[in-house]
Amino acid sequence: MKQYLQEPCNFVIEDIINIIYIETTSNWILDNLTTDEFWVLAYTVGGEAKYRWNNQNFCVRQGDTMFFQQGFSRSAQSASYDPWKFIVVKFGLQPCNNHTREILAGIANICQDQRTAMEQLFTELERIWHSKMPGYIIRCKGLLYTVLYDLMRDSGQFVNQAHPHGKALQRVVQKINENVNKNFKVSELAREAGMSESYFRAMFKSYSGYSVVQYQNFIKISYARDLLLSGNYRVNEVAAAVGISDVYYFSRLFTKIVGTNPSSLFQ
């Protein structure tokens, strides 16, 4: 049987250089800046700014997240009528393989209108960084991994567009994404795709880069994190909403994937 396996997407956040909230003035300008030593994430809390790179102009507004790889050059100017306010994260990152480099390159430089969950993540990053509480660097790295995972997922980077069973597997992925409260058996999803269970397991892994169980867990915990960050639900309510009856198992799984326990999001 021909294999379509990809290298697993993996990278290491080597260090976090700084996390800071900035309120610009009406005359704030960034002139052809190139960050050779680090990567950059910036979330727009308010106001507007005009950016330019590759001879193209872009406008960033509240809710927009920007992502710049190491060595990326750009210029910017804050809007005089509504100066830009943003949280910026500067960090070192090392992709573990070429497949990961391709996935990171596929993330849009501007991911538009990601309010609520993304704003909560950046706000929490900035708060924990400046708190200097015990273990703050580990907690910040965990949240930063979550931000990058969400950007990769939302940019559609976890699918193999050239896969020979792409259409059938995309239906399965969509079913999982739209039913986070359900726990699908592999056999059930295999029937959905019209494959034997063993063949389906191999094809799903080659398509998404994850096992079926891993992918279901990632989607559940990603949705759970958004609910928790909204501040409207308790941990046990969120666990039930994603189809996990054992709160202790939910907390362990959440910590493993997000890098921090669910209760910490309320602190």
Image (cartoon, rainbow, N blue to C red):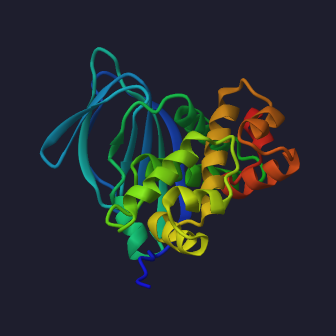
108 sits left or right of 118 in the view: left
Residue farthest to the top, as pictured = 81
Q: Position of residue 226 (x, y in %)?
A: 62, 36
Q: Is residue 135 visible?
A: no
Residue farthest to the bottom, as pictured = 1
Q: Position of residue 137 (x, y in %)?
A: 66, 55
Q: Quadrant of the C terminus?
A: top right
Above/below status of 70 relative to 205 = above
Please identify the quarter of the rendering in which residue 106 is found. Answer: bottom left
148 sits left or right of 31 in the view: right
Please identify the quarter of the rendering in which residue 247 is found. Answer: top right
Residue situated in front as seen by the camera: 157 or 190: 190
Q: Is residue 185 visible?
A: yes
Above/below status of 77 relative to 82 = below
Residue farthest to the left, as pictured = 55
Q: Position of residue 250 (x, y in %)?
A: 79, 49
Please identify the quarter of the rendering in which residue 259 is found. Answer: bottom right
The structure residue drawn at horizontal position 44% and vertical position 85%, both measured from the top left corner, is 1
